[in-house]
Structure formats: C-alpha cells, structure tokens
Amino acid sequence: MSDAPIYDIDPPAFWADPYPDLAGMRARAPIVYVPQLGATLLTRRDDIFDNEKRIEVFSSDQPDGLMTVLMGQNMMRKDGAAHMAERKAIFPTVSPRTVRDTWTAQFRAATARILDDLAGRPGFDLMADYAMPVSAEALKAMTGLTNMTAHETNRVSQGMIDGCANYAGDPAVEANCHDCTASIDAHIDAMIPVLDAAPDHSLLSVQRRAGLSDAQTRANIKLAISGGQNEPRDAIAGTVWALLTHPDQLALIRSGAATWLQAFEEYARWISPIGMSPRRVARPYTLHGVTFAPDDRVFLMFGSGNRDERVFADPDRFDITRDTGPAISFGAGPHFCAGAWASKALIADVALPMLFDRLPDLALDGDAPFGGWAFRGPLRMPVRGPVRGPVRGAARPV
Ligand code: HEM
C-alpha cells in the first residue's frame, strides 16, 4: 500500500453521502489512503486530469480485478495499443455522426412510446417508469441486443455492477452476476445470425465486422451494459430532481436563457453518476511526496475532482450557468467515456425536453433519496403528472 496519509470513513455514511468526506479528504491532503476501501485516492481535479494519462504508472490492466474475472477483459481494462485498437473498432457505433444520423431518432421514438404508456396516470416513479426504460431502450439499440427487455437490461446491468463491487466475496452476489452475464451471452447468441444477415451500427454488428474476437466482442458488450444503463438512468432522473428542487434554474431553461445540455452537464459535475475509476500501479512512482508501489490499488475520484474548490467556485451549488468545461464526469484520459456523445443526445436532446414538454406540471411527490459513491443516483423518485397526450409533430421523431 502507498504511504499516503490515512483517512478513515464510515462505509454506510460514505454510501449515503460521500461529499462531506470527499471535502474532508481534499482539505487533509492531496492524496489519502482509505483503509476501509483498501485503496489510495486521488481527490483533486488537476491530479486526476494529469495522472490518468500516465498509463505506464496508473494502469487499467487489472487481471485479478473482479470486472475482468467476472465479465472478461474489456477495453476499459486494457492499456495502450490493445485498448486503442478496440476503441477504434467501436467508433462507428458511438461517433457523433452515428449518434446524430442513427441513434437520436430511435431514442426519440422509444421515449415517445414510454411517455404514451404513462399518459393518463396521475403519478409514477420517475426512476423506474421513465429514466430506467428510456436508458434501457437506448442501450438495447446501441448494443444490438434488441431482443432483451428493458427490465432485463436493467437487471443484468445491476447484477454485473454488484458483482464488480463484491469485494467481500458474497457467493450469492457472484452467482447472480454469473446469471446476468449468461443472460447477455444467450441474447448475443440469438442476435448474431440476425445482425450478420442485416448489419447495422450496433456494437455487436460493428465489432463483428471489424474482426474482433468473440471474447473481445462479448466483453465489450458487457462493459457497455454495465456502464451504459445506470449512468444515463441516474443522470436523467437526477437532473430532473435537481431542476425541480431549483425552480430558478428550470426557469432559465424555460425562458431560453440556458439549455438542457447545460443542466445535464452541471448535474453530472455536481452529482457525478460515476464517482470513481480504479487503476493498478504498474511501477514505483512518487506524487506530492506519496510513494506508490507496484500493485497498489488507486481510485481516481471523479466525483471529488468535480467538487474541487481549487477549480470550481462554490462547488456544492447547482448552477447551470457555470463553466463545466473543467469537469471530469466522463473521465479525463484515453478511457474517456465512449458513450459520451450518445449520452448527451439521449439526455439533453431527448429525455429531458420530451419529459417537460409532455408534463408541463411535473412535480415531486415525496422524498427522492440518493445513494452510492462509485455510482450515485436517486433510488426512487415519486412524481405527479399528469402526462399529456402526444402533441402531433412536437415530440415525435422526424
Ligand atoms: C451519463 C452517462 C454516462 C457517464 C457519466 C459515463 C461516465 C463514464 C466514465 C467516468 C468512464 C470512465 C472514464 C475513465 O476511466 O477515464 C466511462 C467509460 C466508458 N463508458 Fe461511459 N458514461 C455514461 C454513459 C455511457 C453509455 C450510454 C455507454 C454506452 C453506450 C458508455 C460506454 C462507456 C465505455 C465503453 C467506456 C470505456 C471506454 C474506454 O475504456 O475507452 N457510457 N464512462
């Protein structure tokens, strides 16, 4: 382990709200060792931004890590040329052009159907009944697993996330994770002949055409599902919650003084859907007087960097007019989120405007508790509608 100053946390309190401790860590020292997590944490924005690029020190290759063991070695667990080759191979799925020309219309059509299904209901759970299926339908299209239900996409995503965080080795969590990856493999098996016969821009189709191996293809689809379902889901619901609890900010959008994209980007800075990314130290290294040894576990704390008072004025304030340019919500190095363009289109061009268009009187209807620090978002969000019927030409795909 590194010789960084020790900072103790109470894990349940950290899960309930990590931000007071993250501020305490930043105040204490630039780098801290947290015994309860068995990891050394980089908490300042500029340190994360600079050091994430030093892949010869902070390696993504973690052969013994739970993600690699349970889901196969995906691109996020590779460095250098091996990583870049796969990143290049999947570009036709996630490029800004494909998002604009292919996915956005599909996102709109699926979201319109979800809103139609909610029409007439006086209230619903914005997490379970809107954000979850909107995110899942987008991911089904992008992965190519259109044969999976939205609930199954959500289930297998959560099962893999739980499996990757199962440091205590709970056999039930591990067994459930295996069940989830087996479900994905079965859905892939069924879609391969369909997509080979009619290729499209999906991750499954694009990787097969690029000649990636079966193992690479499956591991990257599992990665996209584990990382691409809960983040847009949590960001959609979270941004709605932030706007409803800050009506002055929502008024800025309604008056045209600010955009949905500004709201999403500020939300993702303020409450980062992915709070951290792990690395393995590959060679001895010293930073701010802290000595790192090979195989030390390091967490790049994006959620902390996004509240770094050295970079963001009044960082705990939700202010959609601030410059979120320095934020590291999507990462800050070669592993910068491959789904960033798709997420921005889904959330800022589709999910938020269509929701507020169809529910002009949308209001919270009870508490919306949040949880998590590695992944953070609302746990549930009861809201009142009602959802208006579709307005011809207003919210439908062109
Ligand atoms: C609000 C939405 C999202 C957020 C905040 C988010 C955030 C992140 C972050 C922080 C990373 C790690 C970056 C790093 O270590 O430097 C990442 C990686 C990744 N994300 Fe996302 N993500 C989102 C949505 C998505 C979606 C929808 C997909 C898939 C369609 C996706 C696919 C990926 C992939 C494949 C990687 C690994 C990239 C690589 O290793 O090169 N993400 N994301």
Image (cartoon, grey):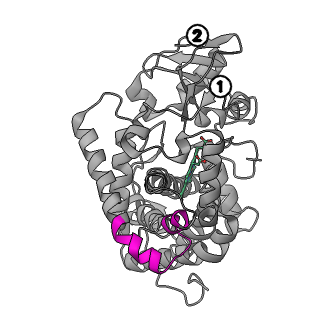
What segment is highlighted magenta in the picture? Answer: 189-208
Q: Which residue is mark 1?
A: 57
Above/below status of 187 relative to 386: above
The answer to which of 134 and 322 lies nearer the viewer is 134
Ligand 1 within 8 Å of disc 2? The answer is: no
The answer to which of 229 and 322 lies nearer the viewer is 229
Ligand 1 within 8 Å of disc 1? The answer is: no
Q: Which residue is mark 2?
A: 5
Q: Residue placed at 42% from the left, 80% from the top? A: 116
Q: Position of residue 222 (x, y in %)?
A: 43, 53
Residue 336 sits inside the magenta stretch? no
Above/below status of 391 relative to 104: below
Amino acid on which disc 2 is placed: Pro
Report the disc number at residue 80: none
Classify mark 1: helix, strand or loop.
loop
Structural crowding at the residue carrying mark 1, measured as other residues with C-alpha within 10 Å and reported as few (<14), some (14–19) or many (≥20) = some
Q: Residue placed at 26% from the left, 46% from the top? A: 176
Amino acid on which disc 1 is placed: Val
How many marks the image carries: the answer is 2
